[in-house]
Amino acid sequence: MRAKAQQALRVLGIVIALVLLVILLLRLIGPPVSIQLEGLATNTLNESQVELSQPRVIAEAEHCDIALNFHGQEDDFLLAQYWHQRLIETLLPATASENSTDRQSEVAANVSFCAVLRHDLYTSDCHEQLGRAWCTPKISYGESTENIINKNNAPSDSFLSKPQIHIVLTDSGLANTRNGVVFIKRNASVQVLQHELGHALGLADEYAMHPDLARQFCNGEFNFTASNLVITHKQWFTPEEMREFLQALPWADFIEQPLGTKDAHGVWRLGSSDTQKIGLFAAKTCEGTGRYAWKPVAEKTWMEQHEIGEVPALYLRLIQQHLE
């Protein structure tokens, strides 16, 4: 009786093993089905898989300095058109005051934009990331957006020859700029867009940054060189240090006054005295980090408080210098 039971168990084990083997073979030779993978495939394409539709031209590229690529839906055209027009108006040099010097008038510059609306490089379903605006690109990370546009479709050769800025429209999240790409809500003000464009064009925040961000930025951990700020680890320089500092200053060609005061021993204390002239003034960026941030003008700019709107003429010149 016991022998028969053992034999039955062996037979049952063999049957189960055969069934499992058949299932395994079917899975190996059958077509793979994965809804999740198919969904991902539509969002991360290679360059050769991307076929772009014709972008809608907002402003032609014949006489512009920067090409704006708005990324959104087809019905975002009027919004992109409005923002483009407002940027033209707000990124004019600030009106010269009675105290403005001839030198400040000399550095005045205009920055002009051409623009298109695209709706094929980012997904339409955009979600926040840690409270910040974000939208997933349809191309694989590491692919060049410019290469894809160039290979597939561009408004004109003239448009492609301009420095490219990408602005992705979302419905939620705080505006931010990542690796030169601006992510911004559709209902944001033009001043917010102007501030974020400042980042994309080489300008850093002049307000006190969040402690973690300030620590990284002010210790040089970011691959970003600001045109409107310099960071030092002390407020006093020897004559030799001052010479080296001056040579590396992004706005060295536009200085109108000494960058500090010199004591009887020739040591310089950083900080200019005339608030109406271009020089060296403390910024709040690195507060609490043990580092010191310096900017070229004494006034509060739109990189410290975006509501200000007005852009110092020097900053437009620094933007142009950054693009060269």
Image (cartoon, helix red, strand yellow):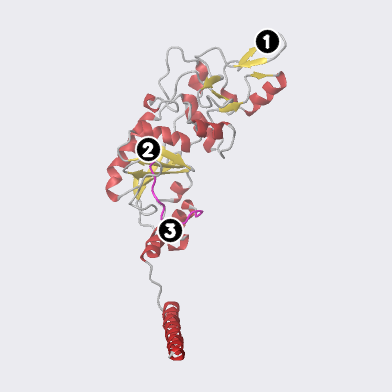
Which residue is disc 2 drawn over? 174
Kindly state the secondary structure of the residue where label 3 is placed: loop
Please indicate whether residue 152 sits to the left or right of residue 86 in the image: right
Secondary structure, mark 1, is loop
- The residue singled out by tag 3 in the image is 44
User: In the rendering, at what x and y percent does residue 8 appear?
Assistant: 42, 88
Which amino acid, by three-letter code, is at mark 1?
Asp
Q: Residue 157, labelled with which disc?
A: none
Disc 1 residue crowd, few under 14, some 14–19, many 20+, Cα 10 Å: few
Q: Secondary structure at mark 2?
A: loop
Give amino acid for label 2. Answer: Leu
Residue 125 in sight from this viewpoint: yes
In magenta, the rendered stretch is: 131-143
- Disc 1 marks which residue? 263
- Identified at 38% across, 35% down, the residue is 193
Question: Considering only vertical position in the picture, is 264 above or below 104?
Answer: above
Count of numbered marks? 3
Q: Is residue 42 left or right of residue 271?
A: left
Among numbered discs 1 and 3, the one appearing first in the sequence: 3
Residue 142 belongs to the span the image colors magenta: yes
